[in-house]
Image (spheres, rainbow, N blue to C red):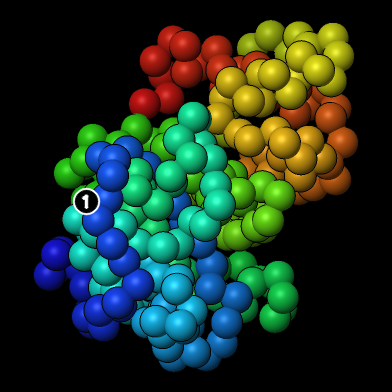
Amino acid sequence: MREELVHHTRLSPNCNDRKLPVTMVVLHYTEMKPVETALERLCDPDAQVSAHYLISEEGEVTLLVPEEKRAWHAGVSHWRGITDVNSASIGIELDHPGHGLGYRPFEDAQIEALVPLLSAILKDYAIPRANVVAHSDVAPARKLDPGELFPWERLAEYGLATPVPKIELGDVYDNDGAFYLALERYGYDITDGIKAVEAFQRRWRPRKVDGVIDGEIRAILFQLLLDRDRGATR
């Protein structure tokens, strides 16, 4: 437990033992208001969902599941060959209305609380910043959160997420099939191709999310893979 960063503890029964070491962090939004509604659901045994932490819009952090336990936040998901994402990750829920209740920018106080918590988690588990991912990254066919307004670049400034890369070589994929194979290589589940493209855009080109493979996102993906192969995105 990270006593200095946690304001409240409200333990959820919705957890079990991990089967994998922690190698990633998954960020979510609750899409429920007020925050108490989300807390009740995350602690309801009938709901069978949970997360390790919830951060309110006011910046208060609630511990729900001890980090050594497997919280039930990711559902059916996939990232870089891992299909039991719950076992391999720490899940952080952000109190937010989401796309369903009036999507809007995230509050500064909330991000200011997320930064030190995320920093401590990444340090303790030696998690590469490329494995700080959105729920939509690991479940593109089902999820949108935390969405296109989440401030990934702000996290990247602290070394807590991969920044949008600076393009060196441009568009190198000559067909959609090559792009999809590269997208899978980067880590995405491409079973639903359009949704996978939308998830990629939501994370890496959030100003335009349309599910269409174009030269810009092809160049971004190639640069991400190039940087990863160079070891520049750890």
Quadrant including the N terminus: bottom left
Write the residue at 52% across / 57% down.
Answer: 75
Tell me where residue 230 appears, x and y as whole percent. 44, 10
In front here: 104 or 127?
A: 127
Write the residue at 85% across / 27% down.
Answer: 214
Write the residue at 81% across / 17% down.
Answer: 177
Task: Specify whether 121 is left or right of 147.
Answer: left
Task: Specify whether 112 is left or right of 219.
Answer: left
In front here: 13 or 170?
A: 13
Considering only vertical position in the picture, is 63 above or below 40? above
Tell me where residue 62 appears, x and y as whole percent. 29, 77
Task: Judge whether residue 146 can be spotted in this image.
Answer: yes
Considering only vertical position in the picture, is 172 above or below 1? above
Considering only vertical position in the picture, is 145 above or below 9? above
Quadrant of residue 65 in the image?
A: bottom left
Q: Amino acid at mark 1?
A: Ala
Tell me where residue 144 appears, x and y as whole percent. 67, 58
Task: Specify whether 209 is left or right of 93.
Answer: right
Quadrant of residue 191 in the image?
A: top right
Tell me where residue 136 appears, x and y as whole percent. 61, 51
Q: Residue beneath label 1, please?
A: 120
The residue tagged with tag 1: helix, strand or loop? helix
